[in-house]
Amino acid sequence: MNGIAAIRSYVDRLVVGDGKCRGMKVLLLDGATTQIVSCAVSQTEILAKEVYLVTRLDSGRSHKEADVAWGDDDGNLELSETNYSSMSHLKAVCFVRPTADNIELLMQELERPRFSEYHLYFSGQLSTGLLRRLAEHDPLELVRQVQEFYADFLAINEDLLTLNCRDTIAMTVTAGTAWARDHAPLYQRHKDGLSSILLALKRKPAAIRYQQVRCTIVSTSYFKSACCSEHFSFVTISPLHLHNS
């Protein structure tokens, strides 16, 4: 199980549009996927794959604007002035999390396109409703493909992965109580992230190891129903055997 290799394989595929986007292009990311990609691939490697610019999808749409090209060795973002009026001939490869906010940004982008065509990749499962909204807001039919690449986690080392989420202890403590609803978005983020890890590493959980009853309810309901039963990708994945303590 190599998390960095899994992320790198996805990046190698998306920067060429999975073989359907040759030539110079712009890579559009969100805040989460910027961290995900930069943990596994260097800026030099990205630019060597016919990528003219790496920028944020949520950056402004002014005539000239500051865009994030990458992070330096200290993790600081590098900004550069960009004139999008001279980039209408370029193609756009977009890699973002499948959230309502990102879908809204993509709809705005497609209604007022800055590039000649769009190749959309999501780091997790995209619901049918969000996909329908995208289709309804693509009047010029510039979207060439939509795919799910399960890279919704940060690979610190080959065998060390993180979702980079805060307040996880509070979420665990309040599980099964009236305050659990306050952490519903965080719980959903963990579900999405864990599902992505399992799919990227091609592992299917056969059992869950736990220590407390409260964690048992959360983990079992997620892995057994949300992951294994509803997502068809787990059908062909070999089981990962864990033991109860």
Image (tube, rainbow, N blue to C red):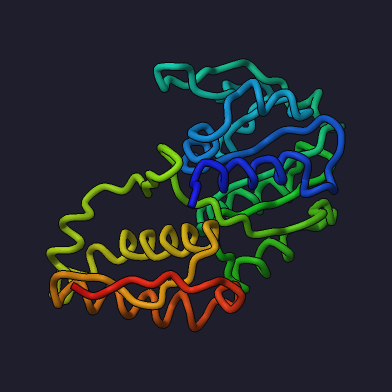
Horizontal side, residue 148 vs residue 183: left or right: right
In the image, 242 versus 18, the foreground residue is: 242
User: Residue 155 appears at what percent x and percent y?
Assistant: 45, 42
Numbered marks: total: 0
Horizontal side, residue 192 vs residue 58: left or right: left
Residue drawn 22% across and 64% down?
Answer: 182
User: Residue 228 appears at what percent x and percent y?
Assistant: 48, 78
When asked about the image quadrant of residue 80, the answer is top right
The vertical placement of 3 against 82, above or below, is below
When asked about the image quadrant of residue 209, the answer is bottom left
Which quadrant: the C terminus?
bottom left
In the image, 239 versus 43, the foreground residue is: 239
Residue drawn 54% across and 18% down?
Answer: 79
User: Residue 183 appears at what percent x and percent y?
Assistant: 25, 62
Residue drawn 39% across and 75% down?
Answer: 223
Residue drawn 72% across and 58% down?
Answer: 146
The vertical placement of 226 against 98, above or below, is below
Horizontal side, residue 205 vs residue 82: left or right: left
Horizontal side, residue 127 vs residue 152: left or right: right
In the image, 16 versus 109, the foreground residue is: 16
When asked about the image quadrant of residue 216, the answer is bottom left
User: Residue 128 appears at what percent x and percent y?
Assistant: 62, 73
